[in-house]
Image: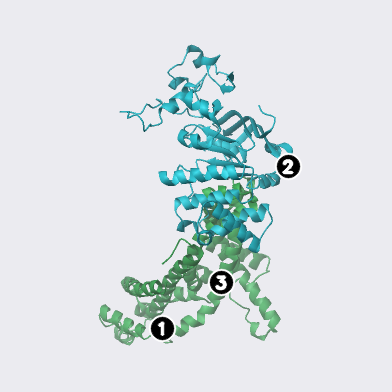
Chain colours: A cyan, B green
Amino acid sequence: MTENALLSIRGLHTYFFPGKAVGRAVEGVSFDVGSSESIGLVGESGCGKSVTALSILRLVSRPGKIVSGEIIFERGGKKEDMLLLSEQEMTKVRGGEISMIFQEPFTSLNPVFRVEYQVGESAKLHLGIKGEALRALVMETLSGAGIKDAERVADSYPHELSGGLRQRVMIAMALISGPKLLIADEPTTALDVTVQAQILDLLADIRLKRKLSVIMVSHDLGIINRICDRVNIMYSGRIVESSPKKEIFSNPLHPYTAGLLKSIPSLSKIEKRLPAIPGNVPDPFDPPAGCRFHPRCQKAMDICKKTEPGETVVDGRMVKCWLYK
Amino acid sequence: MARYILKRLLLSIPILFGISLITFAVIHITPGGPTVVQSQMNAKMSPDSIAKLKTLYGLDKPLHLQYLNWLSRLARFDFGESFNDNRPVTEKILERLPATLQLNILSLLLLFLIAVPLGVYSAAQENSVFERLFTSLSFVGYSIPAFWLALLLMLFFGVWLQWLPISGMASVNAANMPPVLQIYDSIQHLLLPLFVSVFGSIAGLSRYMRSGMLEVIRQDYIRTARAKGLPERDVLLKHALRNALLPVITIIGLSIPGLISGGFIFETIFAWPGMGRLAYESAMSFDYPVIMGVVTAGALLTLLGNLFADIAYAFADPRIRY
């Protein structure tokens, strides 16, 4: 779409091959992330959003495999397809140019190493600094992640810290080498609501300070609303709608997006029962024919059951739905 | 920590007591006895002299008195005297200990040096040809009985090829050899027993190591390490191995009693003059004091080994505090 995108994903297919079956977790995902832009990747559990995020860093583990597609990333003024890079080049991208933080701060830190070592490891690797300079940078980055007593935290083991602190440590670890893009995979899902808000504020703040591009993966539209400029709605391995944030909340195009918005509880009106989208996310090993959403869609037509809709552009927004053809 | 160690040591007293009581009961329930063994082949033994022997050994007293007697001597670190040659049990054990220690320490070292890297490597190569080969070979290695392998190797290297001596720790004339040849001679004697004892354990430990690594590799923090940009080698050898090695501490702790007890069958086959053979010989001749001595020493070391493992855990794993 845009010429000056930092990251362009085109036709990404990531499948899982346990035994003979094929699980089509990501099937033809394309989107762009501009410089200092924040993109939301939203959908229910199992829609392929996390696999998409992991695919960007080529961290999908067996039996998962990126089958086809392009992930074009701007490195040192040149655009390179990361799927063609050597594993050695990829290690420079990971943590150095693109960082990732994960959902579970409780299990995402290595239990046997101190925080200082784990945070510093990335800078040692990508910036080549060590000793006092490294320690100083670790302290600075920990403070930058909103940790007040950085010295104490640096000398702690992960199990000695609270969930919120651990996620701040994860964020510091991701940022220490100065990446251009941060991928956050449900970074607040495992945290208390108050801590969630603090972490989101921190991410919003850091994003502006560091002019960072962000891909925020979440099932929670409330979180997306606070951080993102543009939202991609994923369903069954595809992006079904891509719109600027303001428009997606005021005027959702895809029936699935509308369903997601309706299922957010509102404080202003008291509802007896929250409307939910009936049914479940399709099984990636046995998806329905036609539009993947049609069995759950209230507006489904005959054509939806037979043929999958292509991309339609409506007022500069992208949607995959027969309603707009 | 000191409190914890003291508590554990005090707790081991009743356990040791229980072990000795059970051992004592079992060896006395077993049919036969020292007087039977010593008299059945001798037609001249009269019932009268058998009774005298029993009095000599103190076997005519009620069982509970025999046990209390043994216990009261143990409290003074006195394991009693052997029925066979009337020498102190402590002396007999200390005499056999070096041979067993030499073999077992070497074999334990070799075992860890080979099995740990092997397990790690095969975990890193999951689903490769190497890993499949490793899995099938380790299954074979695990299944081969040590005594059978020992006999085959003795036949092959000792009898057919005549490269290696088949038994004992040294040649008969070793004492007259110059020191360099003496060392060469003992190495030659060591090779077969060492190989057999290491071979049997490699399969078990390396598979344990492999499954530990595979479990650790699936953890979230390994994904974090990869996302940082660490090369796969560092991910495995720094982040994964440190965690996968923790359970190995338990194995080391459990191996400590094995260091002195030796293999019964194993040492007997190779005529290795160690603790295992001592235990075997004393069991065959109903030498009660020696059996009790060997078992008690083994039990004590098992308890100490477990304690050692627990203490080592506290140092290796920051999550564990006592």
Q: Please state which of the two labelled residues, at mark 1 or mark 3, is closer to the viewer.
A: 3
Circles 1 and 3 in contact, beta carbons < 8 Å: no
On screen, residue B14 versus residue A189, left or right, reads left
SS of the residue at dot 3? Answer: helix
The amino acid sitting under disc 2 is Gly
The amino acid sitting under disc 1 is Ser
- Residue B212, image x and y in percent? 52, 54
**What is the C-alpha distance between the residues marked 2 and 3?**
56 Å
Q: Residue at x 52, y 25 (%)?
A: A247
- Residue B214 appears in the picture as rendered: no
**What is the C-alpha distance between the residues marked 1 and 3?**
27 Å
Q: Please state which of the two labelled residues, at mark 2 or mark 1, is closer to the viewer.
A: 2
Give the label on residue B105, or none: 3
On screen, residue B223 versus residue A2, left or right, reads left
Quarter of the figure that contains the N terminus of chain B: bottom left
Q: Residue at x 47, y 65 (%)?
A: B313
Task: Name the residue tied to disc 2.
Answer: A76
Subunit of mark 3?
Answer: B
Q: Please say if A250 is above or below B70.
A: above
- Residue A152, image x and y in percent? 50, 62
Q: Earlier in the sequence, mark 1 or mark 3?
A: 1
Task: Name the residue tied to disc 1.
Answer: B82
Subunit of mark 2?
Answer: A
Q: Nearer the viewer, residue B256 or A75?
A: A75
Q: Please state which of the two labelled residues, at mark 2 or mark 3, is closer to the viewer.
A: 2
